[in-house]
Image (cartoon, rainbow, N blue to C red):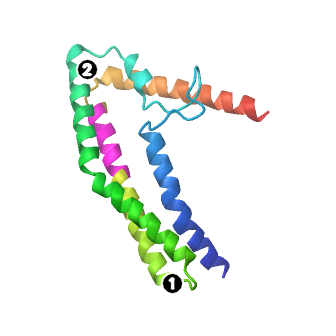
């Protein structure tokens, strides 16, 4: 019974957690840490500004952002499918009897939807990073390390 409860909990929590992680990784929303000096997600926009992009690189980035925006809008049916899956899960949870086979099938479908969404997001990020020179990539890694250290220190200070 414990194993069943764990499976059910994972079937519900995993898609929600992945969805939140995807949204955060893509820079969706500032979160409550997005203020001055915070550790919120900004999609790396501030770090990209520190890389001294050439005008050609800026134009390429803009073109990619527009293309990715169009792809996201064209994939609104995927968002609708995720929303429909979530509603189906709610119906299964509220049913008088529990149908494990249906829950498993739906949980698998939801996981695949999240995986597809995440892969598309990471491909977009990869495309943007490939515009950078080797030196800019190195500088970006340094900036990311500094940001992580700063956020870790901020988080440690808050927990004490």
Q: What span is colored magenta in the figure?
A: 118-128
- Residue 58, labelled with which disc? 2
In the displayed structure, would residue 88 be above or below residue 121? below
Q: Nearer the viewer, mark 1 or mark 2?
A: 1
Q: Quadrant of the N terminus?
A: bottom right
Left of 12 or right of it: where is 27? left
Secondary structure category for the residue under label 1: loop
Residue 56 position, x and y percent, is 20, 18
In the image, is residue 121 part of the stretch drawn in magenta?
Answer: yes
Q: Residue at x 56, y 66 (%)?
A: 10
Residue 35 position, x and y percent, is 57, 24
Q: Residue at x 21, y 21 (%)?
A: 59
Q: Quadrant of the C terminus?
A: top right
Q: Which residue is mark 1?
A: 99
The residue furthest right is 160
Local crowd size for mark 2, using a 10 Å CA cut-off: few (<14), some (14–19), many (≥20): some
**Circle nearer the N terminus (1, 2):** 2
Q: Residue at x 67, y 28 (%)?
A: 153
């Amino acid at each position: 019974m414990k194993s069943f409860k764990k499976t059910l909990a994972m079937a519900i929590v995993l898609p929600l957690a992945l969805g939140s992680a995807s949204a955060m990784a893509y820079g969706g929303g500032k979160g409550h840490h997005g203020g001055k000096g915070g550790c919120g997600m900004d999609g790396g926009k501030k770090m990209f500004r520190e890389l001294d992009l050439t005008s050609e690189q800026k134009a390429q980035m803009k073109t990619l952002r527009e293309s990715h925006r169009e792809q996201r809008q064209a994939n609104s049916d995927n968002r609708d499918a995720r929303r429909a899956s979530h509603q189906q899960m709610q119906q299964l949870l509220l049913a008088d009897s529990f149908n494990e086979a249906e829950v498993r099938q739906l949980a698998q479908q939801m996981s695949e939807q999240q995986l597809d969404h995440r892969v598309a997001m990471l491909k977009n990020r990869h495309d943007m990073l490939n515009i950078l020179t080797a030196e800019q990539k190195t500088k970006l890694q340094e900036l990311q390390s500094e940001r992580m250290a700063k956020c870790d220190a901020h988080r440690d200070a808050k927990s004490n």
